[in-house]
Amino acid sequence: MTDRPVTGGLRVEARRAMAVAWKDLLAEGRARSNVLAVILFAGTALLLFAFAFGPDAQDLRDAGAGVIWLTILLSGILVFNRSYQLELEGGGLEALLTYPGSRRAIFVGKLLANLVIVLLVEAVVLPLAAILFHVPLLGALPGLAVIVALGTFGFVTLGTFYAAMSSRSRASDVLLPLLLFPMLVPLLLAAVQGTTAFMEGDAMGDGGGWIRMLVAFNLIFFSAALWAFEYVIGE
Amino acid sequence: MEKRRGRFQVKAEATRREASSHMTLRAVRWWGLSLGAVGVALTIVFHWQVFFWVPTEASMGIVQRIFYIHLPGAWVAFLAFGIVALCSAVYLWLGEEKLDHAALAAAEGGMVFTTIVLVSGPLWARLAWGTWWTWEPRLTLTLLLWFIYLGYFLVRNSTQNRDRGRKFAAVVGIVGALNIPLIHMSVLWFRSLHPQPVVARTDGPQLHPDMATTVFTALGAWTLVFLSLFILRYGTARLEARAERTSVDMGDPLSAEQGAVTS
């Protein structure tokens, strides 16, 4: 397994990645129903969590950060396998692999497309959770936005990476969470604790530490995924 | 006919190369069994030490004796997962099948010792802290490692193409090991209740000398037991691979089909 000759520099690679991302998003956009279904699932999950923890306002608020991130994880996991299964159904993966250029561009492209989809889900989950769980999201905005951005990126990076393996295995729908969730524990901890810290005004100054944890998580696993994707996707 | 002889020659050469370039099966058996014998003997010795010889710890009482099983188990588990990551990385780099066999052997040994840690930990916790499970950082880390390396076996056996399964497993082994420092840091910040490290301190061990002797006997014993299991399991994996290749050569239609999928 050697690196294929890389034609062109970083800018060409970036354009390749954008092309893959655009193709994936276009396919999702035309199908439309899948993203909508994931969003509806996320809404349903929030509702169930609210019934499980409610109806006391303070209880709901205490559970808020955890519920938000669990909902994101549980609904996001439905997105990743699909991004490869669509390719496999149409025999598109082989074609994609025969194109010139490094395979990292394929990974980054799929990562970007999944990122857009998960951000769409979050755009619904966060305001809905703010209402249902009486969570003061607007007041925590600058710090919270950083936590959400970093947490989402790390989640989608590992999700896209592991789905490249699970989507081509038996029982892929069960295999992906089994592989992914134990790996996501540091991210979940950092995201939930960070979100809680910023919602409470970050009086203890804990938020910065959790942000650093998320940055480290993203750096380590983005680099690892870029390096290992060649082995995962190739023959 | 010509083609067939050519294939046999290639096979014969491959077998010769195999025999000369690394551990032969006889060496595997010898090292596996002799390390195992010493390891088991030492295991008996340290159990005698734990039950009859070592002084009882003052504050925790007799429960503390679980420590002599718990800590060496954890050490061996981490050693095993280190070997998995290392062998997997070199396997991806060189593509040598035997490195994958070594990684698999280490992963299986690692699971055994991780399970020992996960059983002895709660037993201790129940008596020392009055609860079966606490979200104590190192216990949590071990539990997560158990799940991550469970994924190693799952992904390995869930593909049609065996080569692909090996690659997937190697990647899971490496990426999983990268997560160890992150899990450790995050659960440490999350909450801590574990007794602080007593063996590896910069100002010298704070243990009673007899306790230290017992811990190090146990460490040595289980490291040897692990190495023995590791080597023997590696040998079994080599034999399995050889048997598979042989049956493909013999033209067994079923295996030939499998072989075609494998290659």
Image (cartoon, coloured by chain):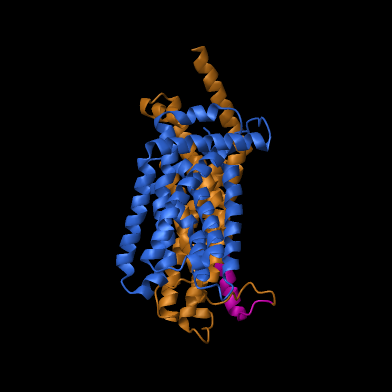
Front position in the image: A209 or B240: A209
Chain letter for the part of the structure drawn in orange: B
Q: Is residue B230 visible?
A: no
User: Viewer-proximal residue, A81 or A198?
Assistant: A198
Side of B19 where B69 appears, left or right: left
Find residue A37 and report its horizontal and vertical position in percent.
Answer: 34, 46
- Using the image, determine if residue A79 lies above or below residue B177: above
Instruction: Identify the residue at the far top of this view.
Output: B2
Asked if residue B218 is among those painted magenta in the image, a careful observer would answer yes
Report the residue at 41% width, 54% height from top: A124
User: Whole-percent x and y of residue B105?
Assistant: 50, 49
User: Looking at the image, which residue sits at the far front?
Assistant: A138
A142 or B58, which lies in front?
Answer: A142
On whether residue B146 falls in the magenta region, the answer is no
Residue B76 % position (x, y): 54, 61
Q: Position of residue B147 (x, y in %)?
A: 44, 57
Q: Is residue A95 above or below residue B129?
A: above
Chain A representation colour: blue
**Left or right of residue A156: residue B82:** right
Q: Is residue A87 visible?
A: yes
Q: Residue at x 36, y 46 (%)?
A: A36
Quarter residue A18 falls in: top right
Q: Which residue is drawn at the image coordinates 53% and 43% (left, top)?
A: A112
Instruction: Specify the segment rendered in magenta.
Output: B204-221
